[in-house]
Image: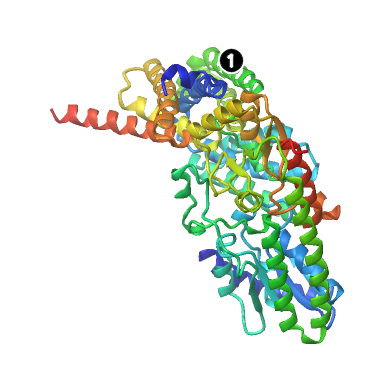
Amino acid sequence: MKYLRWCVVMLFLILPLGACTQKEPATEKGKVQVVTTLFPLYDFARVVGGDRVEVSLLVPPGVEPHSFEPKPEDMVRINRAGMFVYTNPYMEPWVAGLLKGIDRRLLTVVDASRGITFLPAGDHDDEHDVNEGGHHHAGMDPHVWLSISNARKMVENIAAALEVKDPPNAGFYRKNAAAYDQKLAELDRKFQEGLANCGTRQFFHGGHYAFGYLADRYGLQYVSAYAISADAEPRPRKLTAMIDQIRRSGTKYIFYEELISPRVAETISRETGATLLKLNGIHNLSRDELHGGATYFSLMEQNLADLRTGLQCR
Amino acid sequence: MTISEILSYGFIQRALVAGSLIAVLCAVLGVFLVLRRLSLIGDGLAHVTFGSVAIALFLRINPAVVTVAAIPIVLLSSFGILKLTDKARIYGDAAIGIVSSLGIACGVLLASVAGGFNIDLFSYLFGNILAIGTGDLVLALVLFTIVLLAVFFFYYDLVAITFDEELARSSGIRTKTINTVLVLLTALTVVLAMKLVGIMLISALLILPAVTALQVAVSFRATILVAAILAVGSVVVGIFGSFILNLPTGASIVVVNFIVFMLVFSGKKLRQAH
């Protein structure tokens, strides 16, 4: 709260400066300004909106989104925007506080996960971890976008909001959303087929519990080293349990998460001889990935390929 | 799970060995730092690494060696803390505060100018005691040897300047050199040891064993010895305790340290009351 007050003060200091320096290019007339929090939303909004909207990403590339805090410039950007899209209150608990400082009369706020059924957070077979989510996650798993069926729902939500916001272009948005939905449905089918016939149905992950929805969608069992909060410390018993499971089941691969040091996965790999494989939680991209034109679609395709390797699918 | 079963895991063995080595050298340095009112230097120098991360980012340094990039900056900052206390006649706590907040501020500014990161470099700077590799073990051993040899070599001078710097100076000890040696050793320990076991554990091990040992101190040598034993004991108890209670290990070690401090402190009070 203290931070927000400071933001407001900074706003008054920075607004006149901005008027002089004009760092940002003047926004094009008529385009809907959309601010999104995380990369998947950014990607969905730019696919649906095409050249009729201007989408910007709030959390900078490479920053771990669970711990993001906005800069004054971000507050200015949201104030100017027509639409603000966030994943869900479990993922970005800071959104509610942030929006208090914004004039909301002209701003459409979109909870992209509306209508999605949440799964409980954490590792189901370890009752301790379920309670470990931290109060801001309130026990629900925020990583909904990692199931493609949820992603389709999110695209639909964003498209519906754009249609209401910008009625003249409603047909355009609907057409884009429908085309993308078909692509996603196709990819969903590829996941179903690609993961149907595998050597094992269990995958191990040396990161925080992010792939619950993906595992649920494709009937996989998922074991992660941490509970839902990305900044927790691992517990020794959890690590030895994973090591034993990997040894017993003869699993050959251990997945690690994007952006942060794969230290824990490396520890498990040293102990078991399992090979490291990356599984992208698509929370956020690195600067190079973003500029290299990566998309939700391309990253999920990569995930499918790596999962097929890791699960020894045929 | 029996103790021998717990010990059959390589990561537990490495945690015990590297943890104990780091515990000893933190405890030894800690005694000098606490008495010199520089207890928070561990925390302060860890913050300075935020600035060094931003520089690593600009130079697009491989994340695996980001710690190497941090070393010169942290050494320089520790020297800055020393100069501030010496030249500007500022107490150690304020000097640490100045340098560490400047470090964070530079980090924030540089990161903002660079426009985002490729990876979360901080996760490469701060390690975890359960994720220590074989190479890390060698690093801990080298660090241990360097620091203990240096303390052994400069022992009498270090003790002299810790108790009375003026007297030490007038009796011909090169106090400037000795002070520099102390803060540089601390800086090196902080930046390398936090790569292994994380910053929370380092700042706790620099302060708590020393403070506890000072409660029962009879001589300087005994204080150092007691601090080192307490630190190693807390690491061992913390590792096994976290196993039994299914808790995060680093935090458990810190809590064990605090409990030991409370026990020693209350024991001393009780004895005084009699």
Res B121 → quadrant: top right
Q: Residue furthest bottom?
A: A168
Query: Is A125 situated left or right of A247 in this image?
Result: left
In the rendered structure, which amino acid carries the disc numbered 1? Thr
Measuring 63% from the left and 84% from the top, which residue is drawn there? A105
Where is mark 1, residue-wise? B145
| Observer-nearest of A283 and A9 | A283
Q: Is residue B63 visible?
A: no
Q: Residue furthest left?
A: B274
Measuring 66% from the left and 50% from the top, which residue is drawn there? A218
Measuring 54% from the left and 37% from the top, which residue is drawn there? B199
| Observer-nearest of A299 and B145 | A299
Q: Is residue B177 visible?
A: yes
Res A160 → quadrant: bottom right
| Observer-nearest of B15 and A147 | A147
Can you give x and y, in whole percent of width and height, for residue B44 in the image? 55, 41
Can you give x and y, in whole percent of width and height, for residue A6 in the image? 57, 67
Residue B226, compared with residue B268, is above or below; it is above
Quarter occupied by the C terminus of chain A: top right
Can you give x and y, in whole percent of width and height, for residue B138 in the image? 64, 18
Chain of the residue on which disc 1 is drawn:
B
Res B192 → quadrant: top right
Q: Residue furthest front?
A: A197
